[in-house]
Amino acid sequence: MDLPDRYNVGADLIERNLPARAAKIAIHSASGDITYADLFQLTNGAARALLDLGVRREERVLLVGYDSPGWVASFLGAIRIGAIPVPVNPLLQRSEDYDHYIDDSLARLIVVDVNTGEKLQSAAGRAASKPRLLRADQIKPGPEIAGAPTRRDDMAFWLYSSGSTGKPKAVVHLQHDIPYTCVTYAEQVLGITERDTTFSTTGLFHAYGFGNNLTFPYWAGASTVLHAGRHTPATVLDTIEKQRPTLFFSAPTLYNAILNFEGAKSRDLSSVRHCVAAAEALPAEVWRRWKDTFGLTILDGVGSTELLHIYCSNRLDDLKPGSSGKPVPGYELKILDDEGKPAPKGEAGDLYVKGDSALALYWAQHEKSKRSILGEWFFTGDRYRVDGDGFYWHEGRSDDMIKVSGLWVSPIEIESALLEHPAVAESAVVGLSVEGFTRIKAFVIAKNDAVTGDALVAELQEHCKSRLQRFQYPHVIEFVAELPKTVTGKIQRYKLREKETATA
């Protein structure tokens, strides 16, 4: 990309739309619509508030709030003055859940809202650094603040990775990382333009939602729809019918939940031209049902916090349901076997990715950084195979793969097969050690009209055997009411493994 050495992405994302699109709506939200001119003034107001509270260049600012214009202004305003915004999940229930983020980031200030202020006030009081609090919903528009003369390779913001084990790790991103994702995935796969309106069910604190509903639309001069709080099938369908977005982003579990929602087939999704899925593999059956129900194609892809957004994706004119598609222009992928050699085509191995939106490092995690960042390549921790047509197929996380009698088994394949059974609403598959041997266990949420019991267990096992290799079936099936998930809807299989180990 042709970016100048002195570059401030917080300033660029707004100012590139002025004056040509100053009067255009940038954000639709419950608090009202605001234009790009309004957002520019609000961002400057946030920058002034941060400066007045003593925030200086490269100091961290924790953002803990629901999606809102004030959240956006605080994020961009922090970068504008050269500070480092650090978004964190606002849905954590306990005040103590934020202690790690405050201590790890050494944040000088925490931006909160009416929903998060009380629990963050308590957390700030326990912290050694005693950060101050600023209410995002109380920020006022202000006159222009000159953008800090940051460089394209300066630290710009952090995002915390959810991780499969241990405490979340801070992923450090640079000023040029955002534009890279915009000119690769956003422009060349989505084809986003100023005529679009985006709506993402994943929040702005998460890398997926952050690109979907902030960086991509502002780069192109499009509009966004922000929804504060948790999403349900009802709120999603209502928002689409009211706000008429053209680009809809969600996670596979929510696509599935919408399909199972009573009355969904009669809802109007005609404004949407593209649907996108990420965060976990999209089962082919969900893709087909969505296409049959709404006539819309879901572009499934894979990305990560470390790469900032999607680096491998299906396209409208080049896709295979159930796959993650092909590398996004600007990214290279390779699959290596257990000995670090290129895996033969069709065989699973560890996925590595190269692209200029990759993290600079994990903050204060030197050993983890060395293990994950190998020159220009990043070790994703995902197991993949590539077929003869160049499509990449997800085989699970490296630590989720199950080896039975010397053969690797993908939990994704079994879960997808189970989902094709009419009695199954959701499922999660893990490997467990039973008397020294690995056995496959499936946790299944049955549909309301299903009769659970031994007969259904046997039926589901035969169902898997008929669709997969004979060894790829769950030896044990437990019917459950819910599954542990991240805030983006990704199933946390490691929690199921931990639960089984604790009760063994």
Image (cartoon, helix red, strand yellow):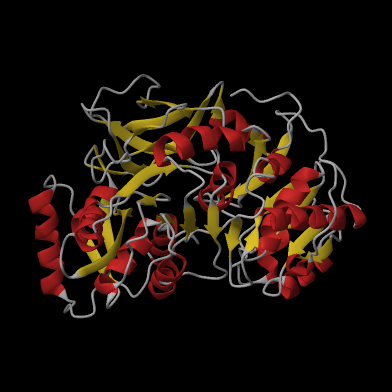
Relative placement, left or right, of 371 versus 15 is left
Percent of width and height locating residue 434:
29, 55
Quadrant (top left, top right, bottom left, bottom right) of the N terminus: top right
Q: Position of residue 293 (x, y in %)?
A: 22, 63
Q: Position of residue 402 (x, y in %)?
A: 30, 45
Determine which quarter of the picture holds residue 393.
top left
Residue drawn at point x = 11 percent, y = 66 percent = 458
Closer to the camera in the image, 421 or 19? 19
Classify 426 as above or below 324: below
Which residue occupies the foreground of this view, 216 or 59? 216
Q: Is residue 220 visible?
A: yes
Looking at the rendered image, the quarter that the C terminus falls into is: bottom left
Residue at x 61%, y 63% (from the top left corner): 67
Residue in front for this viewpoint, 291 or 454: 291
Q: To which quarter of the image does residue 179 belong? A: top right
Please state the total of marks drawn on the protein image.
Answer: 0
> In which quarter of the view is residue 146 placed?
top right
The answer to whether residue 437 is seen in the rendering is: no
Residue at 59% x, 72% y: name it.
30
